[in-house]
Image: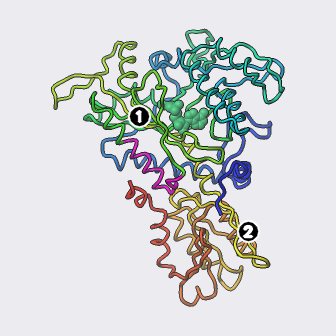
Amino acid sequence: MSIENAGVFPKIIAHAKEYGFVFPSSEIYDGLQAVYDYGQNGVELKNNLKQLWWKTMTQIHENIVGIDAAIFMHPSTWVASGHVASFNDPMIDNKDSKKRYRVDHLIEGYADQLAAEGKADKAQAVLDEMNRLLAAEDFAGLHRFITDEGIKCPISGTANWTEVRQFNLMFSTQIGSVADEANTIYLRPETAQGIFVNFLNVQKTGRMKIPFGIAQIGKAFRNEIVARQFIFRMREFEQMEMQFFVRPGTEMEWYNFWKEMRMKWHKALGIPESKLKYHDHEKLAHYANAALDIEFQFPFGFKEIEGIHSRTDFDLRNHQELSKKKQQYFDNEINQNYIPYVVETSVGADRIFLMHLCNAYTEEVTGEGENRKERTFLKLHPAIAPVKAAIFPLTKKDGLPEKAEQIYKALKTDFRVVYEEKDSIGKRYTRQDLIGTPFCIAVDHQTLEDDTVTIRDRDTAAQRRVPIAALRDEIGHAVSFARVFEKL
Ligand code: GAP
């Protein structure tokens, strides 16, 4: 029985903490809102996801290379990208609770409430009016609408609101020792600009021919005002972005290519088709001529995990204008110079971490009456599981630990495996189920006679006997990245 309702989400958050996946940041000081640390199992899961993405991009696609740009960038970068002028969210404060809300979130919450009361038409009308006012940037109108509808602060219960104001989401800091305006720099709110400003460096030094891509994984920072839903929306997070540079006029072809390809990637990692969907953007960002999100069905609803954007030549053109450095490419197939168009794929490492955690969390009940058994396990794809196999001696005597340790030592050079001899074998199985270890290998007395072990499958709990000599291939096959890539 897999569970798909909002009630399961608090259990997933608790599970993530209890089993070393995600901890609140600086928890001994009561944490820092919307900032999280990855624990011993979380970091392995996240690294596996990042490696899979990295290898897909830079190894499977022969025309994509990677870079690792600095987080700090010249402040003009963010003027050119449009973030200084327009990376804003309209906010409103409740004067009684002193809580600040993103206007769209506040109104959406109100519409959800109407829908839950069976007033679907009214809810839709509210959303339509909100979209109209947001598109027109009519802040006075938004304020009036919130007041007229009598939308209340969920904390104070009052409708005592400030005006609607714009807040920039970029974090700023000072570079150098003198704190003045000229030294203000930003923590990058997206990794993409590090790619744009290196477009010509990579193209020239790598002798890249269009179409080609540049991929990057790195931290991004946004001062999200309404940071909710655990690691879904964080202030410090990690993006995996790829800018694909194409000849103008071919961008829709590549947009469709990447739309399909990225969806396939999520499915190849075991996310069921029924839990994924596309969401086309109706209101396009200033830089895009087409955009969509890939959404996953989280316990709290379908939400964005990845964006595919056709960004035209917006970024390179603006960088060219502001830097006065030509950002052009000579296409010798058509004998023309042009600023390339860009199709971007942008996915949050933390978002897909949360997606896999939600998808994997399984509470299973088997048997009835006296035979009833409950089991919680993480059905993670073996390629991303933090531990690939656990090796257990059945008991702590008769030479079983020594034999099990030999197996452990032989496997650890290829895979992340653990050895455990403490507690009953049942408890040891449970501990591995809870962190999603696909295989448990038990060494028993028969092992000493015929060099075979039992291997227990996490998802079925079924056990088989296999020769020790076959273990490397068995595990290797299940966890191999190559098998994921074959599905693309
Ligand atoms: N360069 C384009 C860009 O940054 P975006 O839609 O703002 O586009 C892309 O972000 C992805 O980054 C999102 O789909 C999401 O996975 C992730 N992301 C964005 N903001 C985030 C946040 N506050 N916390 C965690 N992940 C975030």
For ligand 1, the image quadrant comes to top right
For image coordinates 55% across by 70% down, the residue present is: 409
Q: Is mark 1 within 8 Å of ligand 1?
A: yes
Q: Quadrant of residue 216?
A: top left
State whether residue 170 appears in this view: yes
- Highlighted range, magenta: 258-274
- Residue situated in front as seen by the camera: 71 or 270: 270
Q: Quadrant of residue 305?
A: top right
Residue beneath disc 1: 344
User: Which numbered disc, 2 or 1, marks the residue that appears first in the sequence?
Assistant: 1
Q: Quadrant of residue 317?
A: top left
Q: Quadrant of the N terminus?
A: bottom right
Q: Is mark 2 within 8 Å of ligand 1?
A: no
Answer whether residue 470 is magenta in the image: no
Give x and y (percent) for residue 155.
82, 29
Give x and y (percent) for residue 99.
77, 24
The three-letter code of the residue at mark 2 reads Glu
Give x and y (percent) for residue 326.
30, 17
Q: Is residue 419 above or below residue 62?
A: below
Drawn side of residue 408 relative to residue 331, left or right: right
The three-letter code of the residue at mark 1 reads Glu
Task: Decide: few, some or many residues near mark 2? Use Cα within 10 Å; few <14, some 14-19, many ≥20.
Answer: few
Residue beneath disc 2: 374
For image coordinates 79% across by 79% down, the residue present is: 370
For image coordinates 37% across by 33% down, the residue present is: 343
Give x and y (percent) for residue 137.
57, 15
